[in-house]
Amino acid sequence: MIKAILIFNNHGKPRLSKFYEHYSEDTEQQIIRETFHLVSKRDENVCNFLEGGMLIGGSDNKLIYRHYATLYFVFCVDSSESELGILDLIQVFVETLDKCFENVCELDLIFHVDKVHHILSEMVMGGMVLETNMNEIITHVDAQNKMEKSEVRAASEARVLSIIILI
Amino acid sequence: MALKIVKGSIDRMFDKNLQDLVRGIRNHKEDEAKYISTCIDEIKQELKQDNIAVKANAVCKLTYLQMLGYDVSWAAFNIVEVMSSSKFTYKVSCSQLQLQSVDAVLITTIINSVSLPLVTQDLSSPNQYDTGVALTGLSCFVTPDLARDLASDIMTLMSHTKPYIRKKAVLIMYKVFLKYPESLRPAFPRLKEKLEDPDPGVQSAAVNVICELARRNPKNYLSLAPLFFKLMTSSTNNWVLIKIIKLFGALTPLEPRLGKKLIEPLTNLIHRALDLLYGMVSKKNLMEIVKKLMLHVDKAEGTTYRDELLTKIIDICSQSNYQYITNFEWYISILVELTRLEGTRHGHLIASQMLDVAIRVKAIRVFAVAQMATLLDNGHLLTGNMQRNGICEVLYAAAWICGEFSEHLEDPMQTLEAMLRPKVATLPGHIQAVYVQNAAKLFATVLRKQEGTTDSLAAQETSQLLIDRLPLFVQSANLEVQERASCILQLVKYIQKLQQKEVEVAEEVTALFAGELNPVAPKAQKKVPVPDGLDLDAWINEPPSESESEDEKPKAIFTKEEPKHTRPRHTEVDEKELARRREARKQEQANNPFYIKTSPSSQKVYQDQPGVEHIPVVQIDLSVPLKVPGMPMSDQYLKLEEERRQKERSERKKKEKKKKREKHGRGRRADSGPESEEDITPAHHVDIVTEEMPEVCWVLLQSGYFIPQVMSAQFLFQKSTKHKKKKQKKEKEEKEKKKKKKHHHHHHHHHHHLHSADESVQNGTVEEEEEPLPVRTWPSLLTHVYDVQGNLQDGSQVVVSVIFENKTDHFLKSMEFNVLDSLNSKLQRPEGSSPHDGLAVPFQLPPGVSNEARFVFSVQSIVMPQKLKGTLTFIVKTEDASTHEKLDFKLHFTCTSYLITTPCYSDAYAKLLESGELKSSSLKLEGVIMPFHHLLARICFHHHFSVVERIDSCASMYSRSIQGHHVCLLVKTVSTRPPYISSLLL
């Protein structure tokens, strides 16, 4: 099971957090901070797996992370997950983001965190890996984006309509 | 106005979407908390609005704030409300929220009462994404009540037509099972079914769920093992594979039989991983990676897997010429550690690596030798168990390294002792052979050390040790071992005899194994530029025409011999010829993997040609460089090699004997300066015998498996050619001086008589253009070199090969070769032609071209030398006219032209001498100053004799004429005076 997926930048600012287990908001913030401290002090050439922090569940949990430019992508998982599998999943995640945003950068994640969530929900559901095939993920994300757009268009029409009614 | 306000407020509220919020927060860095609190107030306002779109926007912003750590539980109800919206967009934003943070008791009720019908409604929506979002949302807030109520619905969805829904439904079932375990039993068959779903995504989801379940209670899932096994071998999805392997990890402790089943597919997977390793090593991480692999080697249980690891380690380390190895001591240690593996099949591989590194990395030899000595000392550990015999191959390498580089040994005596232990006799034959051979090398080293300290007793004891131990090997069933052992045993016995006379022998014994092994880059030759004007594709000699080759078939064994000696005045021809042959040979060597390619320093022969000095020598980039120095070879090297090869071709047996002599020459040079060249001590004689051994050894090495071929070939070369060049030089110098006088007496069943041939009898000497006239007309117009060969099949025929070379600037054609027949010798002409007709030379000669023609002569008596006069007529084509020209020449048929090199064993030879049927005569030659062995070599080469036996400065030689006459020749040197030759003829 995946317990949490965190994306934060080199300064520890969270850019996305998704917890699949229940923690209080305070704990969540502490977990993000703790994870940042664990991950950021590691050298570039050392292993990408480490034991999870105390808050997320201690030694039974692992942190698997990758560092891309200004962002850390961290998955907190329990012992049933394979490190290499998750590492691969992070890669799939980032590649998918890159496809969807076209040269993804930190700002994309900041302003479109909802989209990032959306993409993630096509990959991981309730802490379980749903899909690892990037093409499959993108197909579904695109299809849902189209749906949304048509609804937004309809909504804006409705809004105009409501304004007219108001008048 | 009022309208404007209303509109503005609506727009503002609408416009402050997620992006605005994010931007706002970024713009209020100083008072972020304050800004957010106002935003939250706005969101609260938005949630109070009736417009669901506004509510959805608010929920979206809440999601973001929640990430930043703000409490949003107060909005739970609204979130569920938005969730229940019919609009997909709004639901999506809700499903992103972490709803479980909502106050459990209160909200559960709300969710149950409000969302259940809504979710249920969504679950059956015709749009797969509506259903999908509902499932995603549900995955966040499954409660036991929801699980109970929705279990059957979700189970139905597991068989949905859309794989997208199926996989989500499958995954969410896990959550349902957790909250409502009773659902597991009825749902399980369907879940199992999903393992074989045609859609890989659904399959993967099912595997995920079962793996999670099995982790909690593996026992219940043992029955699925075959299914998973099938999946593992068929699936290409890495994620699924990883999960399955994880699952098997949980299952194997419960079912031991499973482990065995898994070995193969798992090793395949590991194989793939190991292949990756191969590509990811660098100088930095190599040691670490190998260390890890070594740990796995230690832990590995199956030999197949362990062998796999072993080869991988060696592959990784040795890739790209040991590119990544920075410390060879380390590598040697790794190799030594690997020898401790039990029952590996890769002893060969380890051995070859040891040898390769020890030979190529000079700096490591001291260390390597020390390690190998230890290995030899503990050899019994490796040989203790016959099951482990694969690894004893490393002893092969160890023995060789210790022997070859014995000067680095700390205690050579101890190693020598270790190599001669009786236990060695249980090793495979080829290893024993190397042991014996290298024991001799060690012996030489030990002797030198001991003599250096003037401890003659110790030296004698060492000899005694060998004499005591070697008989064990002499009895070996392996021929190789037996042969080497008996050779060395005799040698040592002899040495001991000398030692007892207090003669210092160490130097000479060491000389047996002199010569260093130098690696050369395999492609070095290719980098040598082709000299200007050289066409490697051009024929050196025109290919013989069909009819001719047929004609020559029966003489095939002799056709390879080519004329190669010319009088000094024809040196120009000679040079050209040589250059051509050199190139031809170079080509041949280049294509022959066993031939060493010449390296820069050996190219002095070519120094007059541009650019040859710059032949690149490959330098391998290593901190301990694998230096590839050139071979120290003299300028005579190539010529010698040519000669050697020709001899080799023509008469193998003869060549071998010659080698002995040549080596002999080297031996002398290496040791005793004051001794006169003719004066050959017996010690040298022994040298000859034993020195044959190392070469045999090298050849074996080469044909074996370890030293890269080029390297060993080179070594072979060095050892065998060093002395030759010396000989060659001398031969040249002495060419003119050589005046051999022979007195041949002949006595045969047919009582033929052979006259003495008191003149230069060199075969293949150019004898043309003695007549001044044609030479003057066409100065050096045409030269020809010839060679006379007997025909074994037909006792009355000889073949004369003539090489014609056109030295004019004109085209020569219509050449006719005619010889004035004598009573005894006749040129064979086509049937029907008169005895005065010439034979057409089957080719034309453009300027500067040479070609070879062969003519068959029938001879009646071969016991007399003959001179045949002949004429060559030809047409010279100039630009405007063509003239008919002729050239007179003489062909000398000496008695020895009719001899064919035939080997003879000494006992047969003795019988011949005893038979009394030989007629003898003797002759003394004065003024022959060449060394005795050179003389023998020349007799062998030019007069087709072979040496039967040689004792000191006496030699018995044998040959046989084309008509079956036995010719025995005894050659003897009378102390410092010229050799005394006597011959016996039968």
Image: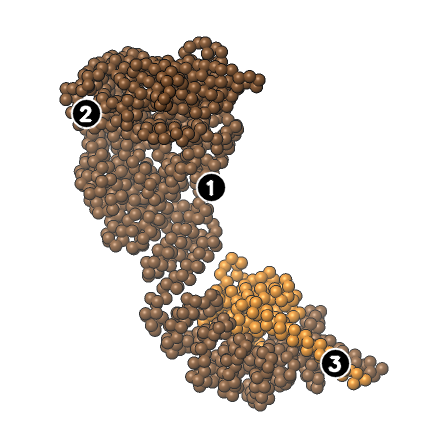
Chain colours: A orange, B brown
- The correct choice, above or below, for B934 with respect to B436 in the image is above
Q: Residue at x 30, y 44 (%)?
A: B396
Quarter of the image for residue B598 reads top left
How far is disc 2 from disc 3 in space, using C-alphas? 124 Å
Q: Left or right: B538 with respect to B125?
A: left
Tell me the residue that label 1 is attached to. Answer: B620
Q: Residue at x 73, y 81 (%)?
A: A158
- The correct choice, above or below, for B106 with respect to B770 in the image is below
- From the viewer's side, name the closer residue of B481 and A81: B481
Let me know if marks 2 and 3 both belong to one chain: no
How far is disc 1 from disc 3 in space, using C-alphas? 75 Å
- Image quadrant occupied by the C terminus of chain A: bottom right
Report how many numbered discs are placed on residues in the image.
3
Horizontal and vertical percent position of residue A149:
68, 74
Q: Looking at the picture, which amino acid does disc 2 mark?
A: Tyr
Q: Residue at x 65, y 70 (%)?
A: A112
Instruction: Look at discs 1 and 3 and give the one toward the viewer.
Output: 3
Tell me the residue that label 3 is attached to. Answer: A159
Horizontal and vertical percent position of residue B83:
62, 83
Q: Left or right: B461 with respect to B702?
A: left
Can I make out residue B463 in this image?
Answer: no
Q: Residue at x 27, y 15 (%)?
A: B864
**Chain of the residue where label 1 is placed in the rendered structure:** B
Tell me the residue that label 2 is attached to. Answer: B909
At label 2, counting other C-alpha atoms closer than 10 Å, the crowd grade (few under 14, some 14-19, many 20 or more) is some
Horizontal and vertical percent position of residue B249:
39, 69
- The correct choice, above or below, for A64 with respect to B940 in the image is below
Quarter of the image for residue B898 reads top left
N-terminal of the two: label 2 or label 1?
1
Can I make out residue B473 in this image?
Answer: yes
